[in-house]
Image (cartoon, rainbow, N blue to C red):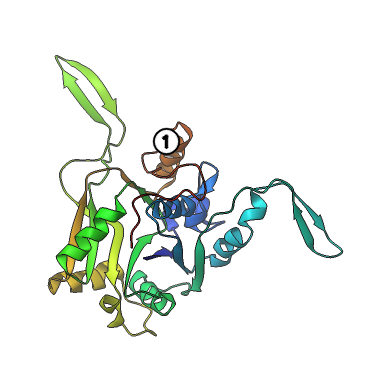
Amino acid sequence: MEAVILCGGKGTRLREETEFRPKPLVEIGDYPILWHIMRHYRHFGVKDFVLCLGYKGSMIRDYFLNYNMHQCNCRLDMATDAVEAFDATTPLDWRISFIDTGQETLTGSRLRMALPYLKGERFFATYGDGVSNVDLQLLLKRHRENGKLATVTAVHPSSRFGELDLHDGAVRSFVEKPQVTDGWINGGFFVFEKKALMRLPLEESNVSLEGQLLEQLSAENQLGVYEHDGFWQCMDTYREMQMLDGLWKSGKAEWKTWSDEPLATSKAECA
């Protein structure tokens, strides 16, 4: 299985950060949110990625092209351009395709433009700005069972307000912006059959995944669902970025499903 990640949007609601870099490179702890997403997929055996680039896409390409050099001390011989690494760690074993899908292209068309670079007939897809501990193996199992062209992960959204647990005129607990238990939204972790997107013209650039393609698939009874009750959080605002960063630094990042060994292979492989 391969994973396509949408990395081309401008992230205007996070302009404090995205004025200078693409949203997928905004950091949670020491690493971009994109790295966190890819580590989660790798935990389930996925190591082939297609990144749909757009806004400031060259920065994402450069980050990974120079990834190993950023993880170690090194010496550069400027006369020969030779680089010697002193204490390089074991590199990640990801294979990444960087696909320029345009500055203004909508999400559905970005996915369509990624299809020629995929080997299989089925693939994972997600956005480059949301983290979750969703079980990708169970998501794939549900997709196989429902026999539909696409499956979307449904999640409970976060509340806009803090939640109070009241008892006898006192507050027993306070939880800042908890996930609500009622209602479901698009959590952004998908499985698609290639033919779900082959109907879109390759040269078309204004097809929305959410507003058009998913609506069409649901109208045709070709959109299945996997209900995820665990952790999920998008990073649309500066406050959400700070929250995720705080969870990571305090050791409370529920989306951290992987071990700290770079090449550790999970027992739960998606094939």
Residue 204 image offset from top left, x and y in percent: 36, 83
Residue 96 image offset from top left, x and y in percent: 50, 66
- Which sits in the foreground, 30 or 97? 97
Residue furthest front as drawn:
267
Left or right of residue 97, residue 209 in this image? left
Residue visible at 38% across and 44% down in the picture: 257
Residue 264 image offset from top left, x and y in percent: 47, 48
Among the 4 quarters of the image, the one containing residue 178: top left
Q: Mark 1 points at which residue?
A: 247
Residue visible at 55% across and 61% down in the picture: 60
The relative height of residue 166 versus residue 17 in the rendered view (above or below) is: above
Among the 4 quarters of the image, the one containing residue 253: top left
Residue visible at 21% across and 65% down in the picture: 144
Name the quadrant of the N terminus.
Answer: bottom left
Among the 4 quarters of the image, the one containing residue 111: bottom left
Count of labels in the image: 1
Residue visible at 46% across and 39% down in the picture: 245
Label 1, secondary structure: give it: helix
- Which sits in the foreground, 165 or 134? 134
Q: How crowded is mark 1: few (under 14 residues within 10 Å), some or many (20 or more)?
A: some
Please say whether residue 186 is visible from this viewpoint: no
Residue furthest right as drawn:
79
| Amino acid of disc 1 | Leu
